[in-house]
Image: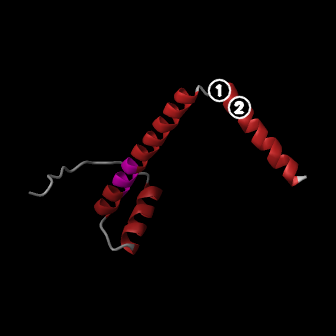
């Protein structure tokens, strides 16, 4: 059985709606198809990012890395890059 769909009303600025319509037209799809795909892609990307962030947090906890450790590493990398440029 196919998934049930629900109609929703969404407000867009006119300039954004024009861009949506242009892309939909160039891809030979409906506005609804384009917006659905954009929502799916956003959700997938957000889930991947959330998963990556959680993985980083676990690594930080396991290794006992502090904010000071991160700040020191960032400063060292920046100093190294600046030295290479000179």
Q: Which residue is mark 2?
A: 71
35 magenta-colored: no
Q: Nearer the viewer, residue 14 or 50?
A: 50
In the figure, residue 35 lies in which quadrant?
bottom left
42 magenta-colored: yes
Q: Are marks 1 and 2 in contact (CB under 8 Å)?
A: yes
Residue drawn where x is 65% and y is 26% of the image: 67
Q: Residue furthest right?
A: 86
Residues in magenta, as a range? 38-44
Q: Quarter holding the N terminus? A: bottom left
**Which SS does the magenta portion mostly show?**
helix
Q: In the rendered structure, find residue 67 and report the number of the disc placed on it.
A: 1
Q: Nearer the viewer, residue 9 or 27?
A: 27
Q: How many marks?
A: 2
Residue drawn where x is 41% and y is 62% of the image: 20
Please indicate whether residue 79 sits to the left or right of residue 38 in the image: right
Residue drawn where x is 12% and y is 58% of the image: 2
In the figure, residue 28 lies in which quadrant?
bottom left
């Amino acid at each position: 059985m196919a998934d049930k769909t629900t109609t929703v009303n969404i407000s867009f600025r006119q300039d954004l709606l024009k861009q949506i319509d242009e892309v939909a037209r160039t891809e030979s799809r409906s506005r609804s198809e384009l917006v659905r795909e954009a929502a799916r892609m956003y959700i997938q990307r957000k889930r991947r990012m959330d998963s990556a962030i959680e993985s980083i947090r676990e690594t930080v906890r396991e290794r006992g890395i502090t904010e000071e450790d991160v700040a020191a590493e960032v400063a060292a990398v920046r100093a190294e890059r600046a030295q290479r440029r000179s």
